[in-house]
Image: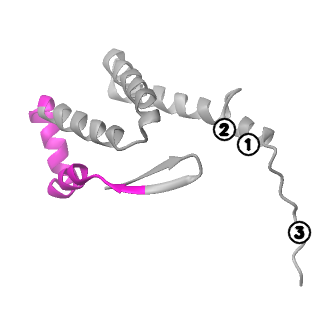
Amino acid sequence: MIIQISHRHNITRKRCAMSQSFFSQLSFDQWVELAQKNPKKLDQIKQKMVNEVIDQAASDRQLRLRAFQWKLEQISRIAPSPLSACITYSHMMWKQIYGGQGLVSACQLSSHKAKILPLKK
């Protein structure tokens, strides 16, 4: 798996060797079977993969990523169903995009303006 990590305006690509090997070794059906038969093992694999990705992030971002991961785990833990957790995650994402301090507001407040040029025929 290749993870893109944006650090300010520089984008780097890092290869997650463990993530790659787990994804390539198991099919979707095998992941489902693992979830049904050995959920503890699945959780261990997931935790290792998440930690690997966070460890490869810029050091000044790691604490925030770990806090966010903790928040996601708490939502999952208290949700009445996986679908309910997924809906909560979706609401969080949309709030980050359209909320008062969201991406859309940040883009609208940006001081970078582009001049629109007409297309020549």
Q: CA distance from mark 1 to mark 2?
A: 6 Å
| Residue at image point 35% right, 38% down | 54
Residue 27 drawn in magenta: yes
Q: Position of residue 67 (x, y in %)?
A: 41, 23
Q: Position of residue 16 (x, y in %)?
A: 28, 52
| Residue at image point 60% right, 32% down | 96
Task: Tell which of 73 and 85 is nearer to you.
Answer: 73
Q: Position of residue 18 (x, y in %)?
A: 20, 49
Cβ–Cβ under 8 Å for marks 3 and 2: no
Q: Which residue is mark 2?
A: 103
Residue that protrudes farthest toward the bottom in the picture? 121
Quarter of the rendering containing residue 32: top left
Q: Is residue 103 above or below residue 19?
A: above
Badge 2 amino acid: Leu
Give the secondary structure at mark 1: helix
**Labels 3 and 2: the sequence-earlier one:** 2
Residue that protrudes farthest toward the top in the picture? 78
Crowdedness near tag 3: few (<14), some (14–19) or many (≥20) residues, C-alpha within 10 Å: few
Magenta span: predominant SS is helix
Q: Which residue is mark 3?
A: 117
Q: Which residue is mark 1?
A: 107
Magenta-colored span: 13-40
Q: Is residue 51 above or below residue 28?
A: above
> In the rendered view, does 111 fall on the left or right side of 103?
right
Badge 1 amino acid: Cys
